[in-house]
Structures are given as C-alpha cells and as structure tokens.
Amino acid sequence: MKTLSIVLLALMLCGGAAAQAVKGSDAKLGLLPGTVYGEIVIKEKSGTGMAGFACSNLSVSLGAVGGAWQRRVSASGNFSTLRCSYKVTNVPAGKQFVAVLRAGFPKGCDNETFDTTTSFQMKLKGAEKLLYDFSVSKIGCVLLK
C-alpha cells in the first residue's frame, strides 16, 4: 500500500507540473508579436522642392509609452498618386504604444510644411494585425535659392 501511495503522489505531482507547463505555454502564445500596417493618404502637396520627394521619405515609428521599445520603417509606394503604405512587424503585444508619421525633407528646403494626424494609445493582442491609416492634410517644401 505504501508503494501505491508513493506512485500516486508522484503521478499527481507530475500531472500538476505538466498542467503548469501547458498553462505557461498558453500565456506565451498570447504574447506573440503582432503587425501594424496601413495607408498614408496625402491630401495636398506643394512647393518647389517636392520634385524628388518619394514615399520612402516618409517613415512610421511605433514607440512604447514610457520608451521601452521602438520600431521604425520607411513607407513605400508611388508618391505621385499621393498614397503610400507601411508595415511594421514584430510589434510587442500587450504593451501600450503610439504611432508617429515623420517626413524626411530633401536638403535645402527653406520652408517645410507637414500637417498630419496624430495617433492615440494602442495595444495589440497576441499575433494581431492592426490596420492604422495616417492622413496628411498638407506636405510642402519651398526652395528659396
């Protein structure tokens, strides 16, 4: 009887450890990184310095609230259509972040204009794909020389 009790106790302990291992795996699966993607729509472009401007001059940065991490990608597409796109992968799940759109103007711009939307705090669930579009009301570069 003593041997049976020891075997039973061992089985119960191992079963509990296995259940904990499965529970831990589920928690990790819920925190798989996700993706944020979207479109950047430009409503108006102006200025004498915009001839060489491309979608790749626009970049999207995702940053954790509190500054623990940051992801940054350049946009792609055909700027002449006034529509660009972006995709940021490996975005940590379960953490608050904001998205920021930036413009890298060509050297020599004497007067830069960049009016865009600002993001609100967001948070991804595990392995989630989140669509977030930006709107640029006006972008411009004026060369005085």
Image (cartoon, grey):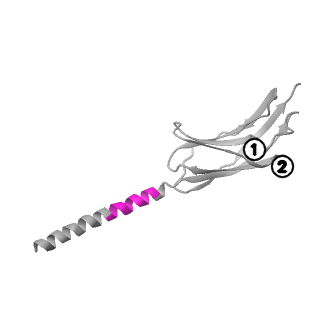
Magenta stretch prevailing secondary structure: helix
Residue at image location 33% in from the left, 64% down from the top: 19
Residue at image location 57% in from the left, 51% down from the top: 90
Quick one: SS at disc 1? helix
**Residue 56 shows which numbered tag?**
1
Q: Is residue 19 magenta?
A: yes
Specify few, some or many for label 2: CA neighbours under 10 Å numbering under 14, 14-19, or 20 or more: few
Read off the magenta span.
Answer: 18-28
Is residue 78 placed above or below 141 in the rendered structure? below
Q: How many labels sit on residues?
A: 2
Which quadrant of the rendered structure holds the C terminus?
A: top right
| Visible residue check, residue 120 | no
Q: Amino acid at mark 1?
A: Ser
What x and y, as percent, mark residue 35? 60, 53
What x and y, as percent, mark residue 80? 85, 47
Which residue is tagged 2?
81
Give the Cα separation between the discs numbered 1 and 2: 14 Å
What x and y, as percent, mark residue 103? 73, 37
Q: Is residue 131 magenta?
A: no
**Residue 10 shows which numbered tag?**
none
